[in-house]
Amino acid sequence: MSVAPIETDVLIIGAGPVGLFAVFQLGLLDMKVHLIDILDRPGGQCTELYPEKPIYDIPGFPRVDAQELVDRLIEQGKPFGPTFHFNEMVERLTKREDGRFAVETDGGKSFVAKAVMIAAGGGSFQPKKPPIEGIDAYEGSSVFYSVRKMDAFRDRTVLIVGGGDSALDWTLNLEPVAKRVTLLHRRDAFRAAPHSVERMKALAAEGRIDFKLGQVTSLEGANGRLSGANIKGDKDSFHIACDMMLPFFGLTMKLGPVADWGLEFHENLVLVDTERFESSVPGIFAVGDINWYPGKLKLILSGFHEVALAAQAARRICHPDSRYVFQYTTSSTSLQKKLGVAG
């Protein structure tokens, strides 16, 4: 039984800071939005690569940590009720006869949008594959680089490899679901939130999970089904039985399927105008680090400016017959009501 596509005014591809600010700008102009991101949480590079990195060039903030900026942008967009779709990568984008866009993800979701706003940074994040010979044979059946549905790991013996936030988060989240979880990391130091590390070690001390030091050297199994992994430790080698593995070795940036959407590019970046930040395909906008135009600066604040103008152009597509009067949030009662701050 086929599922009807999700319909929306604007589909935002990318939930980093620029995509999150687009929620606010589009919401002020009465547009409904859905966001798609290949990661398992909002924030893009700020959250996934350097959540504690200080940023000094956001207007009004002499200093703001990357994660705090993301949190504030999410809070700013909450009045408009955006819908997020994580662990999804857009695979196909085509224009329909009615002028709207049909979008399909690798996770089987489909959307119909009046306009599309690409805010995918330098492209889509792709997981870094561990250098393990023969791992390809297990991908998609026993080896996964993200968790789409936790229930798929129910009553399974899971090996999680890595020492960042994703590895620690899924160790903690899958512990009550899986039959057994083993976390493997090459050293007893982590790039994850301290409270997550403390909780993981507490679970290991209680015997509820296993924590091992070492690196995977080879996999064992047949017909795409994993049965275990061979590990090289500091002093000796050993074997870990598992029927599923989650390697979290970080992310790399690739242009990905965007290259196949019929857009015009400049050195692997989407070419846009500077009036609407619209691509060569009318109705598809590109904002943030994914776009290029003469004088482009790869700054978050530049992306915010681009979003403001792109939202105005998207409004004319989504509400072509509505009369529009430009308003300021500081003085417009109607905008303040939308934000829930009107007295």
Image: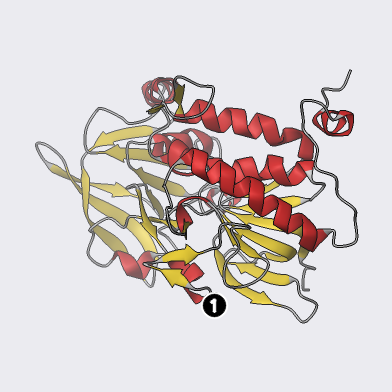
Q: Residue furthest bottom?
A: 97
Q: Residue at x 56, y 57 (%)?
A: 274
Let me know if residue 323 appears in the view.
Answer: yes
- Asked which quadrant contains residue 24, the reply is top right
Q: Say above or below: 138 vs 62.
A: below
Q: Residue at x 59, y 50 (%)?
A: 86
Count of marks overlaid on the render: 1
Q: Position of residue 13 (x, y in %)?
A: 59, 56
Q: Nearer the viewer, residue 120 or 142?
A: 120
Q: Say above or below: 24 vs 246.
A: above
Q: Is residue 205 left or right of residue 173?
A: left
Kindly identify which residue carries mark 1: 262
Q: Nearer the viewer, residue 314 or 160?
A: 314
Q: Nearer the viewer, residue 76 or 223?
A: 76
Q: Position of residue 192 (x, y in %)?
A: 38, 30
Look at the image and tell me in which quarter the C terminus lies: top right
Q: Residue at x 65, y 45 (%)?
A: 308
Q: Say above or below: 80 vs 340.
A: below
Q: Is residue 162 left or right of residue 131?
A: right
- Asked which quadrant contains residue 72, the reply is top right
Secondary structure, mark 1, is loop
Q: Say above or below: 291 vs 213.
A: below
Q: Position of residue 260 (x, y in %)?
A: 50, 76
Q: Position of residue 203 (x, y in %)?
A: 43, 25
Disc 1 residue type (three-letter): Gly
Q: Is residue 329 left or right of residue 235?
A: right
Q: Residue at x 74, y 64 (%)?
A: 113
Q: Residues within 10 Å of mark 1 (few under 14, many from 20)?
A: few
Let me know if residue 42 appears in the view.
Answer: no
Q: How is the image coloured?
A: secondary structure
